[in-house]
Every structure is written in structure tokens, then in C-alpha cells.
Image: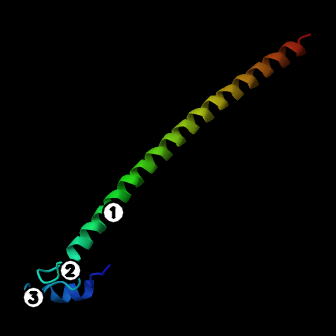
């Protein structure tokens, strides 16, 4: 894959007739299909990344819900133990 030379592109920006180094031109049509493939690869990667983020988010949400339930259970056990200790201490 060819890289666009940004320094050269900036130097040529004053001359609108000069092509950007590495950019596809009418005489350089072999680069356009390659760039199209790169764009397609980036779009696919973006979709896969979005799917991965959604899966991680779902797992985090599920884990958070389970953690909250476990914490509520522990709080209830603690309250039950406190009640039991109070009852025993009154015997």
C-alpha cells in the first residue's frame, strides 16, 4: 500500500495542477481499486469493532447486575445475622 506524503502534499497545495504524491490520478488508476479495498477493510473492521464493543458492554452489564444481586444477598445475610445475634443476646 502506498502512503501519501503529507509534507509533499502541503508543499503542492499552492499548485492546484500538481497531484498529491501517492494519490490516485487519471494516469495512476491502479491505486484506486487498492484504496477501495482499504476503505472496505476499514468499514469491516469498524463493524467488527462495534460488535465487539456491544458484546463487551452486554457482559459488563450482566456482570454488574450479578454483582448487585450478590451484594444485596450479602446485605440480607448480614441483616439476618445481626437479628440472630440480637435474639441470642436476649436469652
Label 3: state its secondary structure.
loop
- Of residues 16 and 82, the one nearer the viewer is 16
Q: Which mark is residue 23?
A: 2
Left or right side of 20 for 82: right
| Residue furthest right as drawn | 91
Indicate the position of residue 26 as horizontal and vertical percent values: 11, 80
Label 1: state its secondary structure.
helix
- Quadrant containing the C terminus is top right
> Tag 2 or tag 3, which sits nearer the N-term?
3
Residue at 23% from the left image edge and 71% from the top image edge: 33
Residue at 27% from the left image edge and 81% from the top image edge: 4
Are dots 3 and 1 in contact, CB under 8 Å? no
- Of residues 49 and 9, the one nearer the viewer is 49
Q: Which mark is residue 42?
A: 1
Which-is-in-front pick, marks 3 and 2?
2
Compared to residue 14, the image places residue 91 above or below, namely above
Residue at the disc numbered 3: 15
Residue at 14% from the left image edge and 80% from the top image edge: 25
Label 2: state its secondary structure.
loop
Quarter location, residue 38: bottom left
- Of residues 91 and 84, the one nearer the viewer is 84
Indicate the position of residue 44 as horizontal and vertical percent values: 34, 57
Left or right side of 53 for 64: right
Label 1 packing within 10 angstroms: few (<14), some (14-19), many (20+): few
Amino acid at each position: 500500500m502506498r502512503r501519501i506524503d503529507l509534507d509533499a502534499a502541503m508543499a503542492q497545495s499552492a499548485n492546484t495542477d500538481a497531484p498529491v504524491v501517492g494519490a490516485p490520478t487519471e494516469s495512476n488508476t491502479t491505486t484506486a481499486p487498492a484504496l477501495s479495498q482499504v476503505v472496505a477493510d476499514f468499514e469491516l473492521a469498524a463493524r467488527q469493532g462495534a460488535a465487539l464493543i456491544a458484546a463487551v458492554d452486554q457482559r459488563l452489564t450482566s456482570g454488574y447486575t450479578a454483582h448487585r444481586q450478590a451484594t444485596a444477598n450479602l446485605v440480607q445475610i448480614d441483616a439476618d445475622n445481626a437479628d440472630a445475634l440480637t435474639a441470642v443476646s436476649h436469652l
